Image (cartoon, helix red, strand yellow):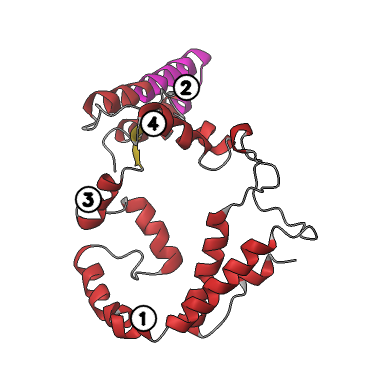
């Protein structure tokens, strides 16, 4: 548990105890003031002690919520793209109760994390929630348990195993190609992107396509056929 959260957790029962023991309005004000001071003290402590405080990033409009409300209200990735354009490929920002976050699209940064997974483990509370949902498997295991599971499944992803699946990749790639080309058909009424193109990107006769969406559908189909001998039909579901 982050040290900056502990004062808030301690203050909550103290404030409740004051209200119960002294149910006057003045004591209620004292309890609220004490709790508020501890919350803001937690945020200040976070700002002064965070080891990556030199990273740039957006200022939080709320001491309690940080930028969390803005992220929830904005379209997916909209604020992050804006921040990356303004502050650079690696940023930091505050979320609930001053909790600090690092976010990066720097390839070198991401490569370092992937190569040192034992040093960058998932937060305990998040990992516990994933384990309750998915079990203690490859996606949630850490350290030695994760490495042992990786050794067990690595042969299934070796060159010999992948070579036997080559026809599946070609078939699904061809299906994806035909789908993308089909978007230029006048009879196709599928919405290919949740947002319109920017004015500077508009070209007569062209359309905007959310390629990531269709790549994800194709990837799901490949996993289904190659791993489970079952075609999820992700690519065909969006065709008209």
Disc marking residue 61:
2
Q: Is mark 3 on a helix, strand or loop?
A: helix
- Look at mark 1 in the image and give the residue it sits on: 162
Q: In which quarter of the image is the C terminus?
A: bottom right
Is residue 102 toward the left or the right of residue 230 in the image?
left
Element type where label 4 sits in the image? strand
Q: Residues within 10 Å of mark 2 (few under 14, many from 20)?
A: few
Q: Tell me whether the residue at label 4 lies in contact with that at label 1, contact meaning CB atoms closer than 8 angstroms.
A: no
Q: Name the residue under label 4.
A: 94
Within-10-Å neighbours for mark 1: few <14, some 14–19, many 20+? some
Of pointers 2 and 1, the one earlier in the residue sequence: 2
Query: Could you say where residue 209 lies in the image, as x and y percent from the top left?
Result: 61, 52
Magenta segment, which residues? 19-39
Q: How far apart are marks 4 and 3 (CA)?
A: 23 Å
Q: Residue 195 carries which label?
A: none
Q: Which of marks 1 and 3 is nearer the N terminus?
A: 3
Q: Is residue 182 left or right of residue 210?
A: right
**Which is closer to the viewer, label 1 or label 3?**
1
Quadrant assignment for the N terminus? top left
Picture layout, residue 30 above or below residue 118 = above
In primary-sequence order, the first of circles 4 and 2 is 2
Image point (23%, 77%), residue name: 151
Q: Nearer the viewer, residue 173 or 111?
A: 173
What is the x, y in percent for residue 102? Answer: 33, 38
């Amino acid at each position: 548990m982050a040290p900056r959260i502990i004062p808030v957790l301690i203050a909550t029962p103290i404030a409740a105890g004051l209200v119960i023991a002294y149910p006057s309005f003045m004591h209620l004000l004292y309890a609220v003031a004490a709790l508020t001071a501890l919350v803001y003290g937690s945020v200040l402590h976070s700002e002064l002690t965070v080891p990556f405080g030199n990273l740039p990033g957006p200022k939080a409009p709320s001491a309690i919520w940080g930028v969390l409300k803005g992220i929830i209200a904005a379209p997916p990735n909209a604020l992050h793209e804006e921040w990356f354009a303004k502050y650079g490929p690696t940023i930091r920002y505050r979320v609930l109760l001053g909790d600090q976050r690092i976010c990066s699209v720097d390839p070198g940064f991401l490569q370092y994390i992937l190569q040192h997974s034992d040093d960058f483990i998932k937060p305990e509370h998040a990992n516990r929630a994933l384990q309750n949902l998915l079990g203690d498997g490859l996606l949630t295991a850490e350290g030695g348990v994760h490495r042992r599971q990786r050794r067990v499944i690595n042969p299934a992803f070796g060159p010999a195993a992948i070579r036997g699946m080559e026809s599946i990749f070609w078939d699904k790639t061809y299906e994806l190609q035909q789908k993308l080309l089909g978007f230029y058909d006048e009879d196709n009424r599928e919405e290919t992107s949740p947002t319109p193109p920017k004015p500077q990107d508009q070209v007569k006769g062209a359309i905007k396509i959310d390629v990531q969406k269709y790549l994800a559908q194709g990837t799901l189909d490949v996993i289904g056929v190659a791993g489970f001998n079952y075609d999820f039909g992700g690519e065909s579901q969006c065709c008209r």
